[in-house]
Amino acid sequence: MKVKKILYKCGVCGVENEYLDYMSNFINGYSDFDMKPVGSMMSIGANIMECPNCHYANYRIYNTIESRLANNLELWNKSKDFQEIIKNYSGSLRKILLVAKQYENNADYFNAYKSYIMASWVVDDKKASDFRVKACQLFTDKILPNYTNNLLQIADILRMEEEFEKSTKIVNSVKGLIDEKEKKLLKIINTETDFIKNNDSKRHNLGEIFK
């Protein structure tokens, strides 16, 4: 593991402090099934920098995840969400949650999801459940719909290339992930399934089923 001490100015309050900058990290051993690292020389969240003056936190303290926070100490101090995290948590958990909330506010839901999973790794099992639930909500509500569209897109491309078996596997996977209440999406999936069954490799338009 390579670590350097470097002077950085906080991207929110502008105060300069010395921070540990982790250049690399050595991991020895297998991770847990949820990808929690085991055998790492660096504790989880150690590479997140936290300003000792205003408690802003980021992987690169001189930048801000949300552009609105750049050089805006007043806004940072007035933000109820951030200040509650600063008040109620400490150590790695506080840094991770501050980063997670910024990603969430910035509609960067994938990194927010990953951050809440990371938060679950640094607390006991009872408290970890809250952060795992939050991560799952973000994934199902904000991330999965985008993956669904991409998966259906590649399924249709495979069908047009007459890769019917591969297309079927993808369509069936998507069907198992979506809510039964999503009638429009189900209609698309069922129609795609019919195309595959009929070995139909022609291009089709959604106007054929939604008029």
Image (cartoon, helix red, strand yellow):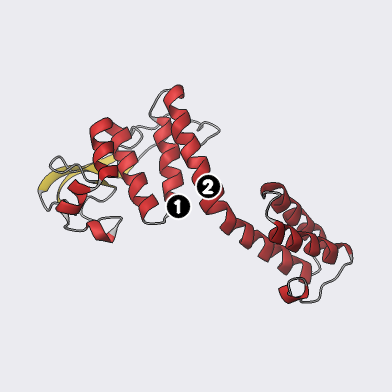
**Front in this rendered view, residue 174 or 39:** 174
- The image position of residue 179, as x and y in percent, is 67, 49
Front residue of this view, candidates 8 and 122:
122
Q: Residue 35, how many percent across, how many down?
A: 50, 37
Image label count: 2
* The label number, if any, that marks residue 109 in the structure image: 1
- Reply above or below: 180 against 202: above
Which is nearer the eye, 169 or 101? 101
Q: Is residue 4 left or right of residue 148?
A: left
The answer to whether residue 176 is visible is yes
What residue appears at the point 22 percent right and 50 percent down from the top-left corner?
A: 61
Marks 1 and 2: in contact by CB < 8 Å? yes
Q: Which residue is mark 2?
A: 139
Q: Quadrant of the C terminus?
A: bottom right
Local SS, label 2: helix
Residue at the location (82% across, 62% down)?
164
Q: Quadrant of the N terminus?
A: top left
Which residue type does callout 2 highlight?
Answer: Phe
* Secondary-structure class at tag 1: helix
Residue 21 visible in the picture: no
Q: Nearer the viewer, residue 145 or 43?
A: 145
Image-based side of 76 in relation to 135, left or right: left
x and y percent of residue 84 in the render? 27, 37
Label 1, residues with CA under 10 Å away: few <14, some 14-19, many ≥20: many
Where on the picture, by quarter, is residue 166?
bottom right
Q: Residue at x 50, y 36 (%)?
A: 133
Q: Looking at the picture, which amino acid does disc 1 mark?
A: Tyr
Q: Residue at x 23, y 40 (%)?
A: 83
Q: Which mark is residue 190?
A: none
Give the CA separation, mark 2 to mark 1. 8 Å
Q: Earlier in the sequence, mark 2 or mark 1?
A: 1
Q: Is residue 161 left or right of residue 128?
A: right
